[in-house]
Image: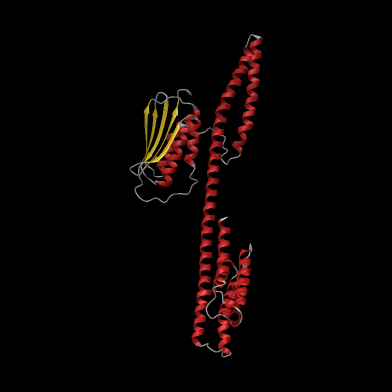
Amino acid sequence: MAKRMQVVLLAAVVAAGTFVPVSGGPIPYQLAVSGAPPIFGILLSALLALASLICVLLPRTPWPAIVAGLVVWLLISAWVALCVGSYLASRTIPERRRLIGYFAVASAAVLLPTAIGLAFGRAGLALGDMLAALGGVGLFVTLPFVLGLWNRARHDVLEGLRERSAQLEREQAARAEQARMQERARIARDMHDVVAHRVSLMVLHAGALEVNAADPGTAATAELIRTTGREALAQLRDSIGVLKSATADTRLGPQPTLVDLDGLLDRSREAGIPVLRHDEGTPQRLPILVEQAAYRVVQEALTNVHKHAGTARTDVELRYLDSVLEVAVINEAPREPVEPLPGSGMGLVGLRERVELLDGSFAAEPRADGGFAVSARFPLEERA
């Protein structure tokens, strides 16, 4: 709606400008307003004003307004229509050859009446009039032409920036979605391994109970448990196995837990990061999913240290409380500028999802001394 109002306003200005020609216009206009009755000049200007109005309001193409600007200038020297036509030409014509052609034609149209008058020795015309005509070229053709080129270049730059911003947002959303899918697939794989292990044990115990039970009813119940367990195990593998095969990481071995934490820290030390481990409390047997999630927290935090802090000193803290396991990875500020390594930037998002699935809490934030801290709390009371 706003753009349409701008077009209507522009058309009204062009139509009104038809009644304000340059002083000393071409012969047809002078005859109409001077040698003949004034009504002829008024009618001619009104007719051209209406034509210019219609040309500007025509949708989708600027060519009628461009041609109308030239025609109105040649007939009655209406400078407003010529300025608008010159601006629209440089703003909308894409081909350089046509742009140069329009500029040449418009400049010739401004110079032509004065040049013809000088050539035929028209009374009252002198060389100063040609200089004035050249000034008209600069004012009515060149100036709006340059403004149109500048506006088009500015528009192209802004459109390029918007497109680049939209592309970056799409890429970031795609990376975020990929990171979420990979993390959920890893969680599904871990749950599959744990649940499949427990269900397998249940099936084995039910089979042993079925064989050794003296009571037929107990044997039948054990058989039902064993059969149901086998069906559940098959369905679990069919459903979650799809997620496992959809990712690049399809290793079938057991997932790392806190038992493997020292090996992870040793690899970080080999990479040049001085890592110190601090354990508080009495280590205890934890749910397997909690141990795997705690290992992932330390692994992702050390990865971020390597990416963003170089060889900054890092402390890994494990606190075994009565009903909570707390994991914290704290690194100091880098000693020298570090060039960040590329990455998806969504590792911490995946960690937060993993921790919250276990009813835990997760935090990752910069420290006042310039370092960074990653921490997680896992409740154990209801899961032990």
**Left or right, residue 106 beside residue 362:** right
Q: Position of residue 225 (x, y in %)?
A: 63, 18
Q: Position of residue 369 (x, y in %)?
A: 33, 43
In front of the other: 17 or 34: 34
Q: Quadrant location of the N terminus?
A: bottom right
Residue at far left of view: 369
Looking at the picture, how far across and down is residue 231, in whole percent?
65, 25
Q: How many marks?
A: 0
Inspect this view and state whether residue 256 appears: no
Question: What percent of the width, then of the height, locates residue 79?
Answer: 54, 74
Examine the rendered structure and indicate whether residue 348 appears above or below residue 167: above
The residue lying toward the viewer, choosing from 277 and 337, is 337
Quadrant in the rendering for residue 30: bottom right
Q: Residue furthest top?
A: 215
- Left or right: where does residue 118 sit relative to residue 258? right
Q: Residue at x 55, y 49 (%)?
A: 170
Question: Camera-side residue: 382 or 217?
Answer: 382
Q: Is residue 209 visible?
A: yes
Q: Quadrant of residue 112?
A: bottom right
Q: Quadrant of residue 194?
A: top right
Q: How is the image coloured?
A: secondary structure
Residue located 55% across and 56% down the image: 2
